[in-house]
Every structure is written in structure tokens, then in C-alpha cells.
Image (spheres, helix red, strand yellow):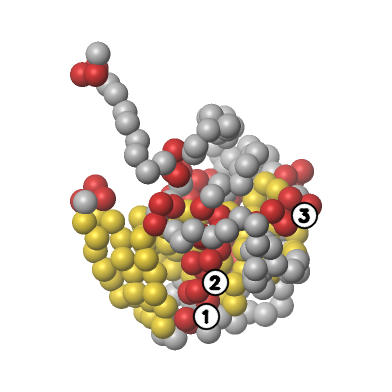
Amino acid sequence: MNMSSDVGRVVYVFIDPYQGRPPKWIGGLVETGRRLTAEIAGRLEVVVFGLDETDVAGFLLDPSPDHIHLWPDGRLSDYDGQRFAQVLSTLLNRSPAPILLTADTPIGRDVTTRLAASGQARLIPRCVELKGQPEQVEASRLVMGGQMERGAVLPLDRPIAATMRTLRLPLVPESTKGARPPISVIDDIPDKWYLEPLGLKRLNDAGLALEEAAVVVAGGWGAG
């Protein structure tokens, strides 16, 4: 796997594979990672699955991350959470006590849960805020079905994975772009897992993504 040589403290921002319009939360997730990187005196690296180098420029915000790790679309088969987690685990093992930020999406929840279950990282699910210090992070996450927030302080002595609620991420203008950082293509791809993926399909590409909606209305048997 061709990667950067610096193995200091790193904040990794994982971008879900997507098609069509980039999700609005990408800028806010990268910005959250950038702020956290400054607080822990580390470096910011973005991990992208399912795009090509020409497409990556679409979310390079000013200033750009220090490095990008890319799993190109041409090498990416159907979604397999275990393979995704294995690639991320390899990255996490390169740095002392790294932090992995993902959006609180189905894919983000899947891969971070796998990392936590295998002992690769401590998981902070449904996180709404992260504040870093040189040796610890302060986290606030939703509990009780999203009705309450609970805080926690975690020492930076082992990897941490956090899924960030997309509606609580900062708004970042889409028009600003930074200089192109170094890009490493992930070529050490693990074999397919024993599960056979049925595919990944985003519904309603032209409309608002469900995770970006401020209000969601659902009906059941009692709605008729």
C-alpha cells in the first residue's frame, strides 16, 4: 500500500463512497477533522473509497488536507464492510493513537462498529462534538434516542473512531478549494469476505439525502 511516510499523530477523515452530487456533510466533516488536528498537534489525512483522482478535487477545501488515501472506483467492487474495515485498520496501525472520523451514515456505522468489535479502536457513536487536547479528547454524543447528550473524556492512548451526526457538522462553503495534496492509491486490497454483497444503491439521487434532512416524516399502519 503506497502511503505517506509521516507516522506522527493523525486524524483520518473517511468519506463514504457516493455517486452523483457530493453529500453536503463532506465539507463539515473535513473541517471538523482539521480543527481536531490543530488541537492535538497532528496531521489531517482523508480516506476516500470509490472515486478517481480527477473526482477527488471536488471536496478539496481551503486549506486542503495533508494527504489523501484513495481506493479508486475502478478497483472498488460492491460494498463489503469487512474489507472496508480491514483497509481502515491498516491505516490506523500506522500512527500512534490516531482518530478516525466518519459521518453517521449506514456505511460509517458499519465500518466503525467492525473496528470496535475487533479491538482496533474505541467507538464514539452518534457524536455531535469533539474537542481535542494533546493527550485526550472530549466527546459529546446523543443518547436516549437522540433526546439527550452525554459527555465523555477519552485518553489518546489507543485509536478512536467517531461517527459524526451530519446535521451537527459545520456548514462549509462549497466554492472554496485548496491546493492538491499528495495522493496515495490504496493497492493492497484484501480479498472478498465470506459474505456476498448485494450492492450499494442510493435512492432518490436528485433529491435531499435522508441524513441531510432536518425533518423526517414516516408513516405506518396508523397513518391510513
Q: Are marks 1 and 2 in contact (CB under 8 Å)?
A: yes
Residue 186 figure quarter? bottom right
Q: For mark 3, what is the residue?
A: 53
What residue do we see at 59% from left, 40% from top?
A: 79
The foreground one among 61 and 94 is 61
Q: Is residue 179 left or right of residue 41?
A: right
**Residue 70 at x, y percent in the picture:** 70, 57
Numbered mark located on residue 198 in the image: none
Answer yes or no: is residue 112 visible. no
| Contact, mark 2 vs mark 3 (Cβ under 8 Å) | no
Q: Residue at x 39, y 69 (%)?
A: 130
Identify the residue shown where x is 65% and y is 57%.
Answer: 175
At mark 3, the secondary structure is helix
Q: Nearer the viewer, residue 139 or 112?
A: 139
Q: Position of residue 138 (x, y in %)?
A: 34, 74
* Residue 222: % across, % down: 21, 19
The image quarter in which residue 148 lies: bottom left
Q: Amino acid at mark 2?
A: Arg
Which label was assigned to residue 38?
Answer: 1
Nearer to us: label 2 or label 3: 2
Q: Is residue 149 left or right of residue 9?
A: left
Q: To which residue does mark 2 refer? A: 34
What SS does tag 1 mark?
Answer: helix
Q: Quadrant of the C terminus?
A: top left
Residue 87 relative to residue 52: left or right = left
Which of the marked residues, 3 or 1, is nearer the chain's N terminus?
1
Separation of disc 2 and disc 3 at Cα? 21 Å
Crowding at label 3, few (<14), some or many (≥20) Cα neighbours within 10 Å?
Answer: some
